[in-house]
Image (tube, grey):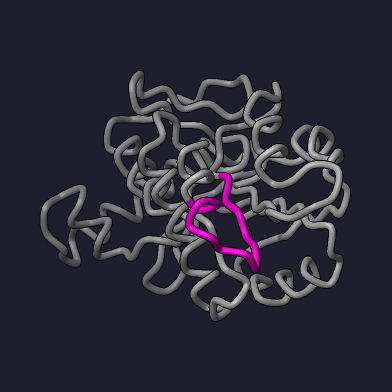
Amino acid sequence: MKLKLIYIDDSSSNIESLKLILEDEFNVVGAGDQSAFPSLLKDHSPHAILLDFHMPVMNGFEVYEKIVIDKNYNGCPVLFISGDIQDDNRLKAIKLGGMDFFSRSLPPQEVKFRLLSRIRLHLQSAAVLTFDNLCLDKNTFAVTIGTDLIDLTLIELRVLSFILRSQPGPISKGQLVKAIWGESSVQNLGKLSVHVSHMNTKLAAWKHEIRMRDDLVLVSKI
């Protein structure tokens, strides 16, 4: 499942360029109208929001201030992008709470990796780990899909927690086995497969699964 990015920029060419740069990892939902953000937040649950700084009617900072008080804002990272990277603009972005300020002159790969890094940092620090409508509360250890509570064993909770914390990328089987049992062995890889199979039986009714592909493990939609 790709990550979802809302990108608000009055230039359609900028939106299309970013879609090409990020197409392997992100579904980019673009909008040229700054006032469209309430419907975007309502209809999508983004992993991050990217705002152009210089826009007519409302600049990026003004849009940001409205986004963070919107009832549908999910607390995801908000970042800024501009061809104008004056120090006072960058400082204002950080002071407001923006996680980064990108220059349009950055190499495409750096933009992609910095976005992924900011999203990963946010997910790892969040009290609730999520994938689509699946949520794991790190304080109460409750796992829910929508409003339904999913009954997982302690080992299953630990497996799911490590997988969700590795987002936005997958985790290797070896890393997961070491995190759970302290060492990687054929025996423990077998244990992992058994626990994942039991979890998938419990998650199947909600069209979620723990997918083991080659050496990687990730949460996916069926």
Residue 66, image x, y percentages: 71, 30
Q: Nearer the viewer, residue 83 or 44?
A: 83
Residue 159, image x, y percentages: 33, 45
Residue sitting at 61 percent across and 42 percent down?
A: 132
Task: Determine whether, in the image, residue 171 is placed left or right of residue 76.
Answer: left
Task: Determine whether, in the image, residue 137 is placed left or right of residue 53.
Answer: left
- In the rendered image, the vertical position of residue 214 relative to residue 180, given as above or below: below
Q: Quadrant of the N terminus?
A: bottom right
Residue sitting at 46 percent across and 48 percent down?
A: 91
Quarter occupied by residue 204 = top right
Query: Is 82 colored magenta in this rendering?
Result: yes
Residue sitting at 69 percent across and 46 percent down?
A: 60
Number of callouts in the render?
0
Residue 120, image x, y percentages: 43, 52
Query: Is 99 colored magenta in this rendering?
Result: no
Quarter occupied by residue 36 = top right
Residue sitting at 16 percent across and 63 percent down?
A: 184
Q: Nearer the viewer, residue 156 or 30?
A: 30
- In the rendered image, the vertical position of residue 4 relative to residue 153, given as above or below: below
Residue 162, image x, y percentages: 33, 47
Span highlighted in magenta in the image: 78-90
